[in-house]
Amino acid sequence: MRIGFDAKRAFLNKTGLGNYSRTLLLQIFQSFPENQYVLFTPELDSEFAAEIQNFNNVKTISGENKAMASLWRSVFLSKTLQQKKLDIYHGLSQELPFRIHHFSGAKVVTVHDLIFLRYPEGYAWIDRVIYNFKAKYACKHADLIIAISEQTKADIVHFYDIDPGKIHVVYQDCSSEFKEPISPETLINTKTKYNLPDRYILTVGALNKRKNNDTLLRAAAGINEIPVVIVGSGNQKNHLENLASELGIAHRILFLGHLPDEDLPAVYKMAEVFVYPSLFEGFGIPILEALNLGVPVITGKNGVFREVAGSHALYFNQNDYKDLETQLKKMLAQNNVTRNLSEDLQNHLLQFQAEATVPKVMEVYTNSLRINGTHVSQQTFKKGISALLITYNEEDNIQEYIENFSFADEIILVDSYSTDSTVEIAAKHPKVRIFHKKFENFSAQKNFAIDQAQYKWCIFFDADERINDRLKFEIISITKTDSDFNCFYIYRDFYFMNKKISYSGWQNDRAIRLFRNGTVRYREDKLVHEQMNCHQKVGRLQHRLQHFSFRNVEEYENKLDLYARLRAKELFENHAEPSKFKRTVKPLYRFAKHYFIQFGFLDGKEGLIIAKLYQEYVSKRFKYYDMLKTGSLEIKPNKVHHP
C-alpha cells in the first residue's frame, strides 16, 4: 500500500500529539516495511526529522512557502494527495484537509479527545469553533475513525452522531524511553539536577483547572511531610502556589515546570507514588508511562482512567480530596498494596504495545479501502448482482419476490426462523442461498446478509417490494458500467390497503437499494429506521419501485409495534430517557405531522389511519422503554420490512 500521513505534529510538537504521531509512525515503518509511506508537513526543520525519515520507504513532502504552510496543509493538500496516487491518507491529529472528498483514496482520521466540547471553559471561543469544525468535518468525511479509547469513541458518537461501527478503538502507547532500564548514575544525576527529595508524590500534566491539582494539594495537606513534585506548566501555577501557602504546605511542593524528554523517566522512577487527579482525558498517557516504569498509580474512578490502568491502580472520587488522601495513605503505608497492583501488569501493558496496536491500525487501513470502494479487488467479488432479503413468515410474498428478482446472479435469504412455508418455497429455487439468523434488529440482520454476498453489486429490497422492467434494466445497466457512485437511491411508491398513498409523508420517500459490495454497512446503533452509511456522493435512479406494504390495518400495526420495541431498546441503550414533555407532546405531534403537515388528509380514510397508527407507535415506544427498565420486555421478529 501507498499510505500518506499528516505528519505536522510528528515533526513539530514535542509532547502530546507529537509523541503519539512519532511513536505510531516509527512502529508502522518498522513493522510493515513492504509499504510506501509519504509524510506531509508544513516544515522540515525539526529535531525529530532525522529519526522519522531514517527509512528507505519513507518520503517527506513539505510546504514550499512557509507563509502559506498552514493553508497548504488545511486546504490545498487534497489536490496533492490525489496527484501522489495514495491508497490511504491518515490524519493523525483529528483533522483532514478540507475538500478531502476530492481525494479518491481511503480516508482515516485519529481522534484523541473532544475535551473542548466537554470542558469549553478551558478554551478560547475561537479555538473551540476551529477545533470543533475540523474534528466534525474529519469524522464526517473519513471512511473510518480511530479513537484512542472507548471514552473518546463514546464522545464521537454523542457529540457528532457518528455510527459506532465506523469507529475503531486502537490504544496508543507511550514512548520507548519509559520502557528502558535507567542506570543508577542517571537517577543520581537527575535527582541532583532538580534537587529532588528522597521520597515524593509525583504528578505530571498541564497546570489547568481540568487537571484537578487543587484536589491533590488538599489531599497532600493531610499527609505528614511527604513532598509533592509537580511537572508541567500552565496558567494555574500562581493559583496552586497560593493554595499551597494557604494550606501550609508550600515548603514541600516543588514545581519543576516542563522537563526535557530525556529527564522525565528518571523523575517518574524515583517517585514513591504517581497521582493523576485529572477530571477528564481522552486517554491519560502519563498513567501508562508510570505503569511501564513500575511506579504505583492512583487516579480518578470516573472517566477513561480504568481503561488505561485496569486493576493496577487505586482509584478515588475526583471531587473528594478526602478520598484521595485515604488512598494515598493506603498506598504509602502498605507494601502489599503495591505488590497486588503489580500482579500480571506486563500482560495488561501488552494491549498498548506495538505488537497489539499496529496490526489493528493496518486492519483499519484494509477495511477503509474496502469501505471506500475504489480499491476493492475485482477478484474479491464476482461480476454480477446479489439480491439480498431478510424474512420472517413471508410465504405470501416469497414466490413473487424470487420471480421479480430472478435476474440477479444469486438471492441471499436470511431468515429469522419462520414458522410458515417461507424457507420451503425459497429452497426450490436454484439461485437462492438460505441462511438462518436469530433476529436481533434490522441493522444486524441486513449486515449479516451483506456479508454473505458473492457478487460485485448488491440490491436490497423487501419481500413485498416490486420493480418493473424499466427499473430492472436501469439496475442492470448501472452494474455493467464503471459507475462513479457506490450507492444509489431509489424512490418508492407506497400502497396501503391496495391504495396508492400520495401524501402522509411517503410522497418523497427514498432509500439506498443498490450499492457496490464491500463499500457500505448499516449503522450498528440504529436498531430501527436503519441507515446505510455511504461515505461518497450517492447516485439516484430515475425509475421508482412499488412497495405493497400492507393489506390491512393489523399488518401495519404489528410492524409499528415491533419498531416501537426496537426504538425503545435503542433509547434505553443510549441512556436517552424520554422526558414527561416528550411523552405528552410527541405522540400528538406525530399525528399532526402525518395528517396535517404532510397532507395525509388528502389520502382520505387511509391517511387518517396512518396518522393514528403513528401516534400509537410513539406512545408505545415510551411504554416499552419503561418495560425495558423493569426487564419485562421481550423483542421477537415480526414480518420484517424496511421503514
Image (cartoon, grey):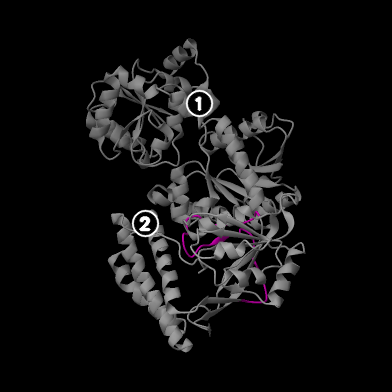
Residue type, mark 1 in image? Pro
Seen from the viewer's position, the closer of residues 572 and 495 is 495
**280 left or right of 175 in image:** left
Q: Which mark is residue 260?
A: 1
Q: Where is residue 512 drawn, in percent x and y? A: 60, 66
Residue furthest to the right: 481
Q: Nearer the viewer, mark 2 or mark 1?
A: 2
Q: Where is residue 212 drawn, in percent x and y? A: 33, 38
Seen from the viewer's position, the closer of residues 300 and 22 is 300
Regarding residue 4, the answer to whether it shows in the image is yes
Residue drawn at x 42%, y 37% as measured from the top left: 307
Seen from the viewer's position, the closer of residues 489 and 299 is 489
Residue drawn at x 63%, y 77% as measured from the top left: 544
From which residue to which does the magenta span run?
A: 518-545
Residue drawn at x 25%, y 24% as measured from the top left: 329
32 drawn magenta: no
Residue picked out by circle 2: 572
Q: Is residue 252 above or below residue 104?
A: above
519 drawn magenta: yes
How many residues crowd around disc 2 within 10 Å: few (fewer than 14), some, or many (20 or more)? some
Quadrant in the rendering for residue 591: bottom left
Count of marks, rendered view: 2
Whole-angstrom CA distance, mark 2 to mark 1, is: 48 Å
Quadrant in the rendering for residue 404: bottom right
